Amino acid sequence: MPHFLHNLLSHLFPRTPRSFLPSRKPIAEKENLPTPFDGAPPLGARFRPRSPSYSLSLAQMEEVSRGLRQIPPLPQGALLVMQELDSETASAASVAQVIAREPVMAASVLRIANSAALGLRREIANVSEAVAYLGFSTTKGLFLRLKMESILPRVTTGRGYDSDKLWIHSMAVAQAAEEISRRSGGGDPQLALTAGLLHDIGKLAINAKQDAPLSKLWPENPDPTETIIDRERKLFGADHAFIGAALATEWKLPKDLCEIIRLHHLPADQPIDLAPAPRKALLSVYLANQLVKYRHVYCPNMEIDEVPDSLTTELHLPNWITLLQDPRLTTLIDRTLQLSGGDTATPAKAA
Ligand SMILES: [Fe+2]
């Protein structure tokens, strides 16, 4: 008998002999009670051990940049669309006008809007309506994904990082980073969004390396003291954060964006030389990255960076465990994962 019914019966029939009432088990003995969420990483993931301090010589940096020059430049048209999406005067109509110049993009936006809007019982027939339905943030994510996929080869075969899963992850990080930045106040939510979309671009660049020993990223019996980032440094001369920043620099993306990409795995309690707005965008991306990893395990033996209280305090947000259960953030992340074609994973017990 449920606890509340037991109490109700006791209240309505106070003289009912106790033996007529079913015995009530102590709460601790009850089965299937949800255990309090303790923030343990989801199955298939672990907290990343701290890596030894790391730096590159100028010659090593030049070597990494040289290796990236085989990757084609980002088309100028892409930068124009991104600028329009970031513009304060942008409207669904103005964004649709820019997108309409790119037929593949226009078709994708329409297709995704219609598949997301199945419950509307009517078709979204034009790009402007699709942009309004999806929102600028999602549209920007779709646009960047299409552009990057036209430049960097798509990998889903188990060789290297799975591009599809990586994009699903990045789209969710972008949405969460934008929301965190907005909630935190005084930052630049658009920068947080773009940085969220591009933070792991170095993994796509690693995928593009011909003859790279990609399978060694996930050895059968990994050294538990070694991280995936350590292995990237050993195998490719630099980790994906540095490689991504070098690629973004080659593409002449804004300097703050390049810096956020470079620093996105730096321990959050390290001194970081950034102006207040990009610093806040960096912290938003860092936090969003870890929150999304709790909803979607996107690579083998995924590693989660710890979120110190000092980071959430600086962003004027509740602590990490509270944020992991924040209904608005988790709904936003799950919705983006679904819209992007991913599976959601509710917080799971430790592996
Ligand atoms: Fe990363």
Image (spheres, rainbow, N blue to C red):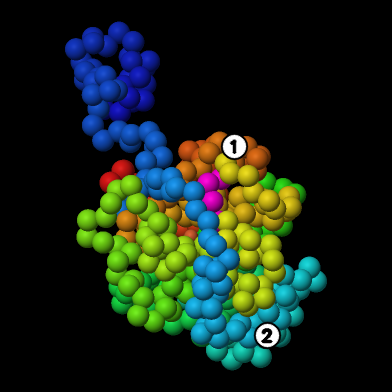
Q: Is residue 228 magenta?
A: no
Q: Where is residue 137, by image quadrant?
A: bottom right
| Residue 222 visible to the viewer | yes
Q: Is residue 266 magenta?
A: yes
**Amino acid marked by disc 2:** Gln
| Residue 151 visible to the viewer | no
Kindly identify which numbered label has been placed on residue 76.
Answer: 2
Where does the image place residue 79, in percent across and percent down from the top left?
A: 68, 79
Kindly identify which residue carries mark 1: 310
Question: Considering only vertical position in the picture, is 177 above or below 124?
Answer: above
Nearest the viewer among 297 and 309 is: 309
Question: Considering only vertical position in the picture, is 13 above or below 290?
Answer: above
- Rendered residue at 32%/60% (across/down): 300
- Rendered residue at 68%/85% (across/down): 76
Between the C-alphas of marks 1 and 2, the distance is 40 Å
Where does the image place residue 145, in percent across and percent down from the top left?
A: 53, 76
Is 109 left or right of 223, judged from the image as shown?
A: right
How crowded pointer 1 is (Cα within 10 Å; few <14, some 14-19, many 20+) is rated as few
The magenta span reads 264-268
Q: Quadrant of the N terminus?
A: top left
Q: Main secondary structure of the magenta part?
A: loop
- Rendered residue at 44%/72% (across/down): 206
Give SS at disc 1: helix
